[in-house]
Image: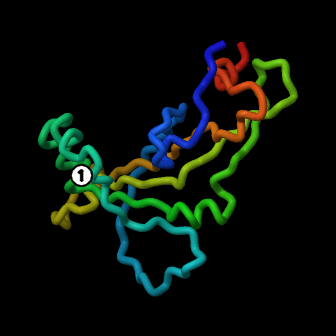
Amino acid sequence: MIELETGDPWNGENKPASFSRFLLPFSYTLNPANPAAVKSDQLCFRQIQPKKDFERERLLYFTAETANVLFQRAIWAEIDADFWQNAGLSGPFSFQSVNRNTEQPIKVALTPPRLVLFEGCSENPSLHPTLCHGFLILDTFFPDICLSGERPGLDDVRSAS
């Protein structure tokens, strides 16, 4: 069995950890909102700037047009991490492996979701609706609390055959 690395890959310790990223595509239409109407205890996305770490390397990796769409003409947003965790939405959540002969559930945690709205910063008001699409980004990982026994393995995350 191939064991997976547990831990939060984004906590700043630079410890390798297994994670899965889910990208859910959608179409959108931006409508003006009243910031005063948003309550402080309301779960909502806040606009962020993409992380500057390795920005130069990222920009050089893509073609100029792709980098422009991803970093210059896109709106990036995320839910506040503290609010996400305090609301109990980060988990950990448990599931039972169908491929393992044990009663111990496997724990999975969720990072705060992020949005990328492509062409969201476009100054062209007549932007064609087919260009208004984005991704909801959900990252999952196995927290270190899994270490109470055997680490989860690759067989645990695949369906039974």
Q: Residue at x 63, y 53 (%)?
A: 90
At which x and y percent is residue 155?
67, 18
- Looking at the image, residue 148 sits to the left or right of residue 47; the answer is right
Q: Nearer the viewer, residue 94 or 148?
A: 148
65 w.r.t. 84: above or below? above
Q: Residue at x 51, y 46 (%)?
A: 138
Say which quarter of the image contains residue 86. Answer: bottom right
How many numbered discs sit on the rendered protein? 1
37 w.r.t. 30: above or below? below
Can you see residue 66? no
Residue holding disc 1: 71
Q: Residue at x 48, y 44 (%)?
A: 13
> What is the three-letter code of the residue carrying label 1?
Phe
136 w.r.t. 106: above or below? below
At which x and y percent is residue 54?
26, 44
At which x and y percent is residue 8?
55, 43
